[in-house]
């Protein structure tokens, strides 16, 4: 299985594209089903906040497992990934599922964020601190961020991830200071540890429970 850890910060965009294109061209097993945390977070927060769907961004989308899932439920979705091979596979999957996606083959650091555009941003296993303020800016008032990342150190083993940019234990909420923490949990997974996070840009929080 492909290790979907965070891309090492020493890679530039072209190196990262070549790295991921090679993996997708080889047809190595990769993640195609939505993450259980994503489904749970969507049902608990996004479904309540946006019962009629909305506009979403799946950043560093890989094979588009979350973008396709959202589009099949009526969301207007932009899916972006550095790998043009992956984006082509997402395009073909969208045709097969008869859903529409706005696809963009670009590194997350080069994506052109528009202020106040998205109701929902999905960010899984990609940490680039330089774009976090842009992500916040791109959320509408009341918009949600659903995020999952590998921790820099596992609290149980002290093991380090492949990326020095990965958040330390307890750090991720502080990287999105403008967001109301709706959910934050850290747990050990495969000797590395992951952090799961849902944040909401200031707006009406009625009807949404907060859990840490």
Image (cartoon, rainbow, N blue to C red):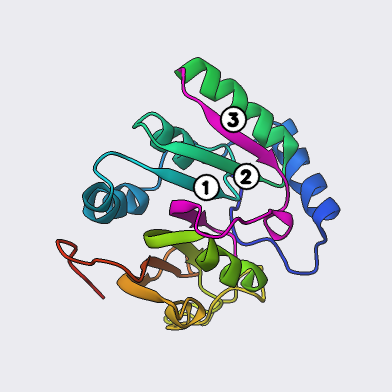
Q: In percent of the image, x 40 and y 47: which residue is there? A: 35
Closer to the camera: disc 3 or disc 2? 2
- Specify whether 125 is left or right of 69: right
Question: Do labels 3 and 2 touch, CB within 8 Å?
Answer: no
Task: Name which quarter of the figure residue 188 lies in.
Answer: bottom left
In primary-sequence order, the first of circles 1 and 2 is: 1
Q: Which residue is mark 2?
A: 80
Q: Is residue 169 left or right of residue 95?
A: left
Q: Position of residue 62 (x, y in %)?
A: 60, 43
Whether 120 is among the magenta residues is yes
Which quadrant does the C terminus fall into? bottom left
**Measured Cα–Cα span from mark 3 to mark 2:** 10 Å
What residue appears at the point 57 percent right and 45 percent down from the top-left corner?
Answer: 61
Q: Secondary structure at mark 3?
A: helix
Q: Residue at x 38, y 28 (%)?
A: 72
Q: Are marks 1 and 2 in contact (CB under 8 Å)?
A: yes
Q: Secondary structure at mark 1?
A: strand
Picture coordinates of residue 27, whole percent (x, y): 67, 31
Near-viewer residue (45 or 188): 45
Magenta range: 98-127
Q: Which residue is mark 1?
A: 58
Query: Farthest residue toward the left?
Result: 207
Identify residue for label 3.
90
- How would you rate the neighbour count of disc 2 (Cα within 10 Å): few for under 14, some for 14-19, many for 20 or more? many
Helix, strand or loop under label 2: strand
Does 39 sit above or below residue 96?
Answer: below
């Amino acid at each position: 299985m492909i290790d979907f850890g965070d891309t090492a910060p020493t890679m530039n965009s072209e190196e990262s594209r070549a790295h991921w294109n090679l993996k997708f061209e080889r047809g190595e097993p990769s993640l195609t089903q939505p993450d259980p945390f994503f489904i749970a977070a969507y049902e608990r927060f996004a479904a309540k906040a946006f019962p009629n769907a909305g506009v979403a961004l799946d950043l560093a989308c890989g094979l588009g497992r979350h973008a396709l899932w959202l589009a099949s439920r009526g969301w207007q979705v932009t899916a972006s990934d550095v790998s043009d091979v992956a984006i082509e596979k997402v395009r073909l999957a969208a045709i097969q599922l008869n859903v529409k996606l706005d696809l963009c083959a670009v590194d997350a650091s080069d994506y052109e964020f528009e202020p106040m555009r998205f109701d929902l941003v999905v960010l899984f296993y990609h940490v680039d601190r330089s774009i976090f303020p842009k992500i916040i800016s791109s959320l509408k008032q009341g918009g949600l961020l659903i995020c999952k990342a590998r921790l820099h150190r596992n609290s149980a083993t002290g093991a380090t991830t492949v990326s020095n940019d990965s958040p330390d234990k307890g750090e991720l909420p502080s990287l999105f200071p403008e967001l109301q923490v709706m959910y934050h949990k850290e747990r050990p997974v495969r000797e590395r540890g992951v952090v799961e996070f849902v944040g909401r840009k200031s707006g009406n929080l009625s009807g949404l429970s907060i859990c840490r």
